Image: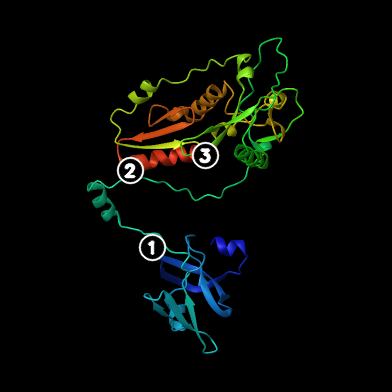
Amino acid sequence: MKLVSSINMPIESTEFVIRVSNPLGKCVLVDKVCKDCPLRIRGHYSPANLMLLSFDEFDVILGMDWLTTHDVIVNCGRKNIELKCENGDILRVESDEHDKLPIVISHMSTRKYVRKGYEAYLVFVMNAKETELRIESVPIVCEYPDLAPGTTPISIAPYRMAPTKLKELKAQLQELTNKGFARPSYSPWGAPVLFVKKKDGSMRLYIDYRQLNRVTIKNKYPLPRIYDLFDQLKGAAVSSKIDLRSGYYQLRVKDADVPKTPFRTRYGHYEFLVMPFDSINAPAFFMDLMNRIFRPYLDKFIVVFIDDILIYSHEENEHAEHLRTILQTLRDK
């Protein structure tokens, strides 16, 4: 259906309703057809009457009538098919070795492996197009914290860095500016930067806001106690954890407060348009946002600690619904 609408294929009504078996093993009734659609296979054209089906898993399915018309021979061992063109030529179509299907096992086999102690993971996949949001379209859900009265701009010279770290710095600065998270700055404020090695061996850019944090009025929003969160998991049999990627970067800084976020580097002076990870109030602001978003579900089947989300349920079917609810909420917000 999507293919037909996307390229404006002409649609005609059939003389009578046709019963068609789809790949899912079910029968559907069809009364619309696109006649003489030109199909090109390895440079050869072949017209086909394509009936409209009410699912979008595949763009085109060549059924038994088309396979019979072209005397198609499927060779599973060699992974190719042979078909007869309209001019009588035999066309061989080889499979693409780089496009192999994943290994799929049945539900019964999965249960058997789980009972034997194999590790299993419940995964929920959402079929949705990713849209690239510009920074201007992100709601201002966070204002940079007020500073203590009488504070003058703080600016510290960049720290020395080894050549390997300078190379990493250049790459990360390029990524931040490409994504619209940071931009060149002319502000009198400026904090130095350094790198912190993460568990996986990669380097995280750390903005040394210690001087700025000392004069920042602290946000008193309470963070949850870990033991209180664990108490909510009593009786849960299934759980899934979501670690939000670059969560703080989803919060846009108020335009008037952007000049307080700059950092100084060997390659220039930059300022953040989104909440910096190293601001002393970043966890409190983000925790406040998470509680607002998930308030209807907190302590029912979800607990949140800053950018870590844990969904818990009593059984698998219920857990699938809980996962769907949380993932859709994240996408909507």
Element under disc 2:
helix
Most extreme residue toward the bottom is: 88
Pointer 3 local density, CA inside 10 Å: few below 14, some 14–19, many at least 20 = few
Residue bearing mark 3: 202
Residue bearing mark 2: 317
Task: Decide: is 264 above or below 42.
Answer: above
Q: Are marks 1 and 3 in contact (CB under 8 Å)?
A: no
Q: Residue at x 53, y 77 (%)?
A: 48
Residue bearing mark 1: 24
Task: Decide: is 239 above or below 125.
Answer: above
Spot occupied by residue 253 in the image (x, y as percentages of width and height): 65, 28
Check disc 1 and give the amino acid type. Leu
Residue 236 is left or right of residue 144, and the answer is left
For marks 3 and 2, the one nearer the N-term is 3
Q: Residue at x 44, y 48 (%)?
A: 125
* Quadrant into which the C terminus falls: top right
